């Protein structure tokens, strides 16, 4: 019997531990020949912090829906989602 446990982590602590989930994805992920999945996307956008928080809350809701779906099939799928500030440059008011 395998149960499912939803895991949502707030990333804090020493920098070495902050990427543990990313390393886990790298270790777990497989690329079956001819399959559409895995699928990844990386996007960057300049938005206010409160909007980023709204997106983060929606990602949490989506992840909860994912882990509460009816079990079935032969493959265990993983989902990694996150919103993070970057070191990429912002813009000056004159750029608007």
Image (tube, rainbow, N blue to C red):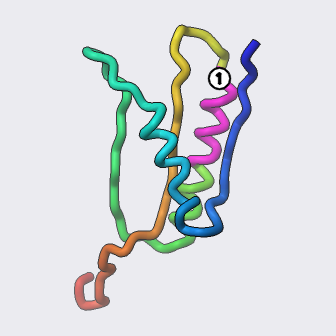
Q: Position of residue 60 (x, y in %)?
A: 62, 47
Left or right of 79? Residue 6 is: right
Residue occupying the point 53% across, 63% down: 16
Quadrant of the image containing the C terminus: bottom left
Q: Is residue 96 above or below residue 56?
A: below
Quadrant of the image containing the N terminus: top right
Whether residue 61 appears in magenta in the rendering, the answer is yes
Quarter of the image holding residue 12?
bottom right
Residue occupying the point 47% across, 46% down: 23
Residue occupying the point 40% across, 70% down: 86
Taking depth in this image into account, of 9 and 58 the one nearest to the observer is 9
Residue indicated by mark 1: 69
Quarter of the image holding residue 6?
top right
Whether residue 64 appears in magenta in the rendering, the answer is yes
Q: Secondary structure at mark 1?
A: loop
Q: Which residues are magenta?
A: 59-69
Q: Is residue 4 above or below residue 84?
A: above
Residue occupying the point 52% across, 72% down: 49
């Amino acid at each position: 019997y395998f149960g499912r446990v939803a895991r949502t982590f707030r990333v804090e602590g020493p920098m070495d531990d902050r990427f543990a989930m990313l390393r886990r994805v790298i270790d777990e992920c497989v690329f079956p020949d001819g399959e559409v999945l895995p699928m990844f996307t990386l996007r960057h956008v300049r938005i206010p912090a409160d909007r980023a928080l709204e997106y983060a809350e929606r990602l949490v809701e989506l992840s909860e829906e994912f882990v509460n779906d009816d079990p079935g099939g032969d493959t265990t799928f993983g989902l990694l989602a996150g919103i993070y500030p970057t070191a990429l440059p912002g813009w000056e008011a004159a750029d608007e």
